[in-house]
Image (cartoon, rainbow, N blue to C red):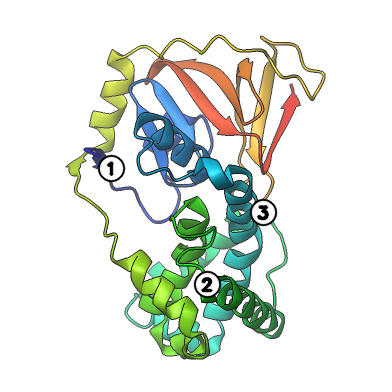
Amino acid sequence: MKRKEVHLPLVMPKPKLLALTGGYRRTPVLQMGADIYCDTSLIAQIIDDIQPEPHVYPPSCDALTRLLSQWADTMLFPALSGFNFQPQGAEYFFKEMKTEQAQALIADRMAMRGGQERITYEDAHGLVVSYLNQMNQILKDNRFICGNQPSLADFSCYHPLWFTQTQVSIVSSILNDYPFVQSWYERMQSFGHGSSIIITADEAIAIALQETPQPLPKEKYIDLHAIELGSEVEIRAQSLGTESTRGKLIAANHHRFTLERSSPEVGLVHVHFPRMDFVLKKI
């Protein structure tokens, strides 16, 4: 798919991003005109809707893909992060950075966790061994996590392992004991990244200002919070980047929330969030 891409700072502040999202700081974010989609799980759904062949949520294993993607994001990712940044891995990762850059990155990620205690290396190591064993068993008889077709579950599992292999390769030998995981990793790696046109953050904001949000689909409002449609609300991730976004709740289905926001900088925008792993409350 053709796309435009904005490169953002690795750490906060990210004023241009927050102007579009209203506070949500994590990346990637998908912008389509004046519609802003937050979190990879929702972005993947939108891409699947636009170009369903091949599916990233295959109809034959849609529910399983969603569950395993959430597991990868909330269990596999933090376990591998704790393993990757054992003393040897941390020294390797930061060796080319200036001291102030390393300190800024560490402080940013601590703030991103919102005070949540970091898993110890020993606990992380044990979890990683367990998870890799389980993945190896799954991939013994399947080309991909959910069968013979790749899905978001594969990409969700791939990206923390990609970090291990490419950014802290000094500790990547742990994968040597899992040949089916290694073969799967090579298959995932072969997909590549496609091509994109680089634009500036100011250009992205100008696009939002010039456009109007797409009409919302005509579907039933799913209210599981006892919050009336049109209420002022705030939404945030349950963990890892818990800064909130405020706006008017204008839609909610089984998979997503949509907030309407307006500011002189970006104009009227619709900001969309997944239900899974996000917290909604009335202001």
Q: Secondary structure at mark 2?
A: helix
Q: Which mark is residue 139?
A: 2
Point out the frontmost of discs 2 and 1.
Answer: 2
Q: Quadrant of residue 126?
A: bottom right
**Tag shown at residue 6:** 1
Looking at the picture, tell me which residue is in the foreground, 188 or 167.
188
Q: Determine the residue located farthest toward the right in the rendered image.
A: 226
Residue drawn 66% across the image and 9% down it:
230
Q: Earlier in the sequence, mark 2 or mark 3?
A: 3
- Can you identify the residue that label 3 sits on? 114
* 151 w.r.t. 80: above or below: above
Asked if the residue at tag 1 contacts the one at tag 2, i.e. Cβ–Cβ closer than 8 Å, the answer is: no
Q: Secondary structure at mark 1?
A: strand
In x, y percent, where is residue 121? 65, 82
Seen at 36% across and 44% down, the residue is 54
**Which of pointers 3 and 1 indicates the residue nearer the eye?**
1
Q: Is residue 25 visible?
A: no
Residue 153 appears at what percent x and percent y? 53, 55
Residue in the picture at 57% in, 22% down: 258
Q: Quadrant of residue 229?
A: top right
Number of residues whose C-alpha sits closer than 10 Å to that of mark 1, classed few (under 14), some (14–19) or many (20 or more): some
Are the residues at dot 2 and dot 3 in contact (C-beta closer than 8 Å)?
no
Q: Amino acid at mark 1?
A: Val
Residue at figure coordinates x 62%, y 50% from the top left? 64
265 on left or right of 58? left
- Residue 218: x and y in percent read 55, 9
